[in-house]
Image (cartoon, rainbow, N blue to C red):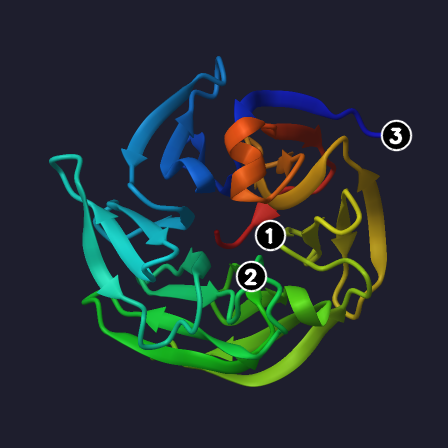
Amino acid sequence: MRQIDIYADGFRFLEAPRWHDGALWCSDMHAGRVYRFDPGTANAEVVAQHSGHVSGIGWDLQGRLLVVSMVDRRLLRLDVDGTLREFADLSSVSTFHANDMVVDANGRAYVGNFGFDFLGGEQPRPTVVGSVEPDGRVTVAAEELLFPNGSAITPDGRTFIVAESMADRLTAFVIATDGSLSDRRVWADTPGVRPDGICLDAEGCIWVASPARNEVIRVAEGGEVREQIPMPRRTFAVALGGADRRTLFVCIARSSSPTDTESDPGSALATIRVDVAGVGLP
């Protein structure tokens, strides 16, 4: 049985963990913050503060931080003066709150969205993944997805995989040289998992956060579950990092409700040492 350690605790709702430039970065969705965690002490440095909820993070080709602003459906960029400014308006493609994101090696951002009022109890409806070019131009990359959530890109840059939370599956697309997505296929069905954040490893498997089951699972293409690890709280996102990329960082929380997390900041980063290193993006 693998050991689970708490790396950092006391946050509102951690999401979108990324191993970048020798450190773990993470957004605190409900606090509107992006943190960088010192790898030696796990102390959290606030690198960006926003007035609204934030989710997916990434970096452009100049190394500037990109942050998804959820409710107003914008992609923000952290400028050299420390100010978050609008880089792209996602409202033309996002039918409800913008959410997680992966940025490819060419600086192109793929951004998912809820598609419907999830917390308000609205019935699920399909939506799209938007694509934001390095010049800020916004297009639709893929359609008819049920709550496109965490996403990843294979090391060769040729395959985009997204968790469709409300469809209980991971869906893959071929990435063309112009960034367009085609040849849609089911990468793996994940019944009952409600897949949220995901990350890839060097054996071609995907670690999946399952808020429905309070666990993380390692899934092979086709759907075979290779490993299941129960977690002490609900799980929402994962990243493989550390010097050897064999530390699985897991965003856990007692609740995903903004009302709950305001009075009970019960979100933490947990760590688990695993056997296979992370690859690809994010």
- Marks 2 and 1 close (CB-CB < 8 Å): yes
Q: In this view, does 278 lie above or below 200?
A: above
Inspect the image, locate mark 1, and give the three-letter code of the amino acid beneath it: Gly
What label does residue 149 carry, if any?
Answer: 2
Q: Dot 1: what SS?
A: loop
Residue position for label 3: 1
Q: Can residue 152 be seen in this view?
A: yes
Give the residue at x 52% y 42%: 258
- Marks 3 and 1 close (CB-CB < 8 Å): no
The percent coordinates of residue 3 (x first, y second) are: 78, 24
**Residue 242 appears in which quarter of the rendering?**
top right
Q: Dot 2: what SS?
A: strand
Farthest bottom residue in view: 183
Circle 3 Cα neighbour tier, 10 Å, few/some/many (<14 / 14–19 / ≥20)? few
Asked if residue 238 lies left or right of residue 231, the reply is left
First in sequence: mark 3 or mark 1? 3
Q: In terms of depth relative to the viewer, which is nearer, 37 or 278?
A: 37
Inspect the image, locate mark 3, and give the three-letter code of the amino acid beneath it: Met
First in sequence: mark 2 or mark 3? 3
Q: Dot 3: what SS?
A: loop
First in sequence: mark 2 or mark 1? 2
The percent coordinates of residue 201 (x first, y second) are: 64, 50
> How far apart are labels 2 and 1 at the CA level?
7 Å
Residue position for label 1: 197
- Marks 2 and 3 close (CB-CB < 8 Å): no
Q: In this view, does 219 lie above or below 81?
A: below
